[in-house]
Structures are given as structure tokens and as C-alpha cells.
Amino acid sequence: MNTYLQKLCELVPLVLFFAFYKAFDIFAATAVMVVTSIISLLIILWIEKRISHILLFSAVISIISGIVTLYSKDATYIKMKPTVLYIIFALGLLVSKTLGKDFLQMALGHAFEMPKDKWWQLTCSFSLFFVSLAVLNEFVWRNFPEEVWVNFKVFGIIPLNLCFVILQFYRFKSYLKLNH
């Protein structure tokens, strides 16, 4: 799958969410996010003929939480969406590993050749990171004004993810396959 297209289709709903929040309110932003998430999935399906499981799952959680937010007129649901998503990601990584399917190894095995204990360390690191993001999201939306949470969602979570991935790359770079 074209990763640039996937990243663009993940980013557009977030950027429009932010723009519509600043121009209108959380409900207008949520409505635009729901619509653009659906359009993004359809574009990826049309161009790539398939959608990655993670992108599909993430978009479905966004769409469901967005619809519930709009229907109930309660922004709590959209604010809790990152928490739910990150907890599910953390549990998914740990459960898949204990069931003998290592999602990270399946996703990154083409680039890294590591012993099982290193894959386990990477899985635990990502799981702990996702739980930390969930806790941080809960802290921010429950203790700060809505605008602070929106700014954190847009300008906090993405850099935190990027920094974490870069740190993990450097931590495990000695296992990088040079001829892949």
C-alpha cells in the first residue's frame, strides 16, 4: 500500500478537524472529520483496492465516536476516542504476541531481523507507549479547556508518536536489514 497516500488520508481528517474547530466548534469539526474519514477510506479503496487493517480500524473508531458525539451532542465521546484507540492498540499488540502472532514483526519483519526477545521488547515498548498516550489524553481532556485538548490532539500526539518511533529505530537499528 502506498504509505504516502495512507498518511495523507489519515492527516486530512485531522487537519480539517482542527480548521473547523477553530472556525466553528467541536461539533462542526467532528462532522467534517467523520465525512472526510469516510471519503479518505473510499479514496484509498479506489486507488489501492484495499485498506490496511490498522487504518480501517482507526477510521471506524473515529467515525463511530464522531457519530455518537454528533447524535448525543456530547463532545466527551470524541475526546475519549484517542484513549479507546490507544488502549485497543496496546492490548492488541500484547494479545497478538501471546497468541503467537507478532503484529510488529509482521509489519516490520521486512526491515528488521531480530531475535524473539527483541521483538518482545519492542512490543512491550509500543504497548507501554500507547497506554501512556491514553493516560495523557485522559489527563488533558479532563483537566484543561477543550481548546487545549484540540491543540494537544493535533500538535501533541503526532510529535510524540514521531519521537517515539525515531527512538525505537535508534534503539533497534543494529538489527536493521541492509539488503531488503
Image: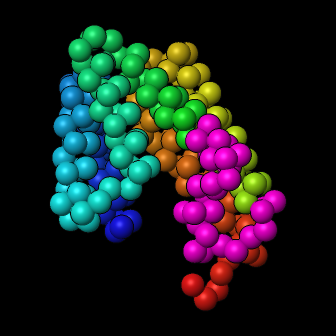
From where the camera sits, is residue 34 visible?
yes
Residue 99 at what x, y percent from top left?
67, 47
Q: Is residue 128 left or right of residue 12?
A: right
Taking the spot 57% from the left edge, 46% from the top edge, the residue there is 160
Q: Nearer the viewer, residue 106 or 78?
A: 106
Q: Quadrant of residue 58?
A: top left
Residue 75 at what x, y percent from top left?
35, 17
* Quadrant where the image shows the N terminus: bottom left
Q: Is residue 87 left or right of residue 98?
A: left
Q: Quadrant of residue 32?
A: top left
Q: Nearer the viewer, residue 162 or 68?
A: 68
Identify the main secondary structure in magenta. helix
From where the camera sits, is residue 25 visible?
no
Q: Residue furthest right?
A: 117
Residue 92 at what x, y percent from top left?
58, 41
Residue 162 at what x, y percent from top left?
55, 55
Q: Residue furthest bottom?
A: 179
Q: Does the magenta segment cover residue 93?
A: yes
* Quadrant where the image shows the C terminus: bottom right
Taking the spot 41% from the left edge, 16% from the top edge, the residue there is 76
Numbered range of the magenta stretch: 90-118
